[in-house]
Image (cartoon, rainbow, N blue to C red):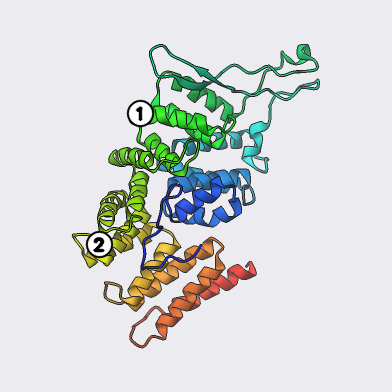
């Protein structure tokens, strides 16, 4: 992942969700480019993006692009769940439940296909738990709902296996539970079903069904569903791409306080390239920034420095830059260091610049990105050689360099 330059905001478009590290994370993940998705997902996850945190949980749990690691899966699911990501919460619960059942498993999610019932005779593969069917209510809008009845599969000896109880996985149990609740009109359950259909969790992946469930929940006013629906219209997943409908649903979610929708709307408006678009972008980024959205904080600060907003204020810009760097990943920290070192709208400070370069380098090192960590070392040393700057903490370059050498040697 390249280093973000201070001169521009993070991302120029919104594809599929956020066009910076979070957007690239989701784009690569849904394109099944898992190995390439790890770095941007880690950046976005550390910046507090719950969608990226959830995706990291999935990749570590299933070994997608990385070695399976149940501890890491639990870590990222937990972070996403703590922010209210419901699907991450149920996966976390399933993960912990499996841990209790068997601490000897190499990976917890391997147990989802394992039955605890010992079958003495050969058994056929269990049939699909759910099969999409269309049911129409006389009093409500037609809803596409999966059937709860197992589909009979051919078996060489039906009599021998019919008394063997079908062991449902945790995913399948949750799918049935949410399906039952969705039939009663529960908007949250419909949203969760949409996620499960979209991810292929507990049921065969089906984006058409996902759109249907998101639509039902969105029409009931659930912000998470409105945001998800808007992003699917933008991305053209399960439905023809439609920017107008994407903005409509994102706007509904944003007005209900969904920070991610607010951020994405800002990117769409900023991408217009007009002054009016930048002013509108600033409005949405300010709302998301106040909720702690690191990328929105950064982008809002960029607009302040550009003088693109009516209440242009260099002090306010730096406040947002610092907030973003405190809560964000190494890219944001590196960017802030450049601002301090290059006097972009603020008083130059070699000490502050060195501090943020150091923090960015440490963060990259923790991610295994030695290349960018070394760039941070070089930047601190360049500061020390600048006769116009006072850098009392120039020793941080040697401290970081030593950490890099230790990481490289495996000690």
The CA distance from mark 1 to mark 2 is 35 Å
Q: Residues within 10 Å of mark 2 (few under 14, many from 20)?
A: some
Tag 1–tag 2 contact (CB < 8 Å): no
Q: Position of residue 379 (x, y in %)?
A: 45, 77
Using the image, determine if residue 79 lies above or below residue 205. Answer: below
Q: Residue at x 35, y 36 (%)?
A: 223
Q: Looking at the figure, which quarter contains the C terminus?
A: bottom right
Residue 73 seen in the figure: no
Using the image, determine if residue 289 lies above or below residue 217. Answer: below
Q: Residue at x 35, y 38 (%)?
A: 249
Q: Residue at x 45, y 28 (%)?
A: 213
Q: Residues within 10 Å of mark 1 (few under 14, many from 20)?
A: few
Q: Position of residue 141 (x, y in %)?
A: 40, 19
Tell me the number on the disc at residue 377: none
Q: Is residue 191 left or right of residue 275?
A: right
Q: Place residue 247 in its image quadrant.
A: top left
User: Residue 223 or 249: which is nearer the viewer?
Assistant: 249
Q: What kind of element bears circle 2?
A: loop
Q: Position of residue 86 (x, y in %)?
A: 44, 35
Q: Residue at x 59, y 23 (%)?
A: 130
Residue at the extreme left of the image, as rendered: 311
Q: What kind of element bears circle 1?
A: helix
Using the image, determine if residue 385 lies above or below residue 216. Answer: below
Q: Place residue 410 in its image quadrant.
A: bottom right
- Identify the residue position indicated by label 1 in the image: 219
Give whichever of discs 1 and 2 has the lower sequence position: 1
Residue at the extreme bottom of the image, as rendered: 387
Residue 191 seen in the figure: yes
User: Residue 26 or 274: which is nearer the viewer?
Assistant: 274
Tell me the number on the disc at residue 308: 2
Q: Position of residue 194 (x, y in %)?
A: 48, 31
């Amino acid at each position: 992942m390249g280093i973000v330059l201070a001169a521009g905001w993070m991302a120029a478009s919104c594809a599929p969700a956020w066009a910076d590290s979070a957007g690239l994370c989701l784009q690569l993940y849904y394109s099944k480019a898992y190995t390439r998705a790890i770095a941007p997902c880690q950046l976005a996850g550390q910046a507090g993006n719950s969608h990226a945190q959830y995706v990291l949980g999935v990749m570590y749990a299933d070994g997608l692009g990385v070695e399976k690691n149940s501890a890491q899966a639990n870590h990222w699911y937990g972070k996403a769940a703590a922010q209210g990501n419901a699907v991450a919460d149920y996966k976390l619960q399933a993960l912990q439940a499996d841990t209790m059942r068997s601490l000897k498993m190499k990976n917890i999610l391997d147990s989802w296909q394992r039955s605890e019932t010992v079958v003495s005779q050969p058994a056929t593969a269990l049939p699909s738990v759910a099969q999409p069917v269309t049911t129409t209510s006389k009093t409500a809008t037609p809803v596409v709902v999966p059937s709860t009845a197992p589909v009979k599969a051919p078996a060489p000896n039906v009599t021998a296996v019919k008394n063997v109880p079908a062991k449902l996985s945790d995913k399948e149990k949750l799918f049935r539970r949410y399906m039952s609740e969705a039939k009663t009109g529960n908007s949250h359950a419909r949203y969760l079903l949409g996620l499960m259909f979209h991810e292929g969790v507990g049921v065969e992946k089906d984006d058409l069904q996902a759109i249907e469930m998101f639509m039902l929940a969105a029409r009931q006013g659930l912000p998470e569903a409105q945001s998800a629906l808007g992003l699917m219209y933008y991305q053209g997943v399960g439905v023809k791409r439609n920017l107008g409908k994407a903005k409509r649903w994102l706007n509904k979610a944003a007005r209900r306080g969904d920070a991610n929708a607010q951020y994405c709307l800002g990117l769409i408006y900023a991408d217009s390239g007009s002054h009016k678009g930048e002013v509108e972008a600033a409005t949405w980024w300010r709302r998301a920034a106040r909720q702690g959205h690191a990328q929105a904080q950064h982008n809002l600060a960029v607009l302040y420095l550009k003088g693109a907003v009516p209440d242009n204020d260099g002090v306010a810009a730096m406040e947002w830059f610092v907030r973003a760097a405190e809560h964000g990943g190494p890219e944001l920290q590196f960017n802030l260091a450049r601002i301090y070192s290059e006097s972009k709208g603020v008083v130059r400070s070699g000490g502050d610049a060195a501090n943020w370069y150091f923090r960015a380098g440490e963060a990259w090192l923790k991610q295994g990105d030695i290349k960018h960590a070394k760039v941070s070392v070089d930047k601190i040393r360049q500061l020390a050689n600048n006769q116009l700057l006072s850098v009392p903490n120039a020793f941080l370059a040697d401290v970081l360099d030593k950490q890099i050498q230790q990481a490289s040697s495996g000690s």
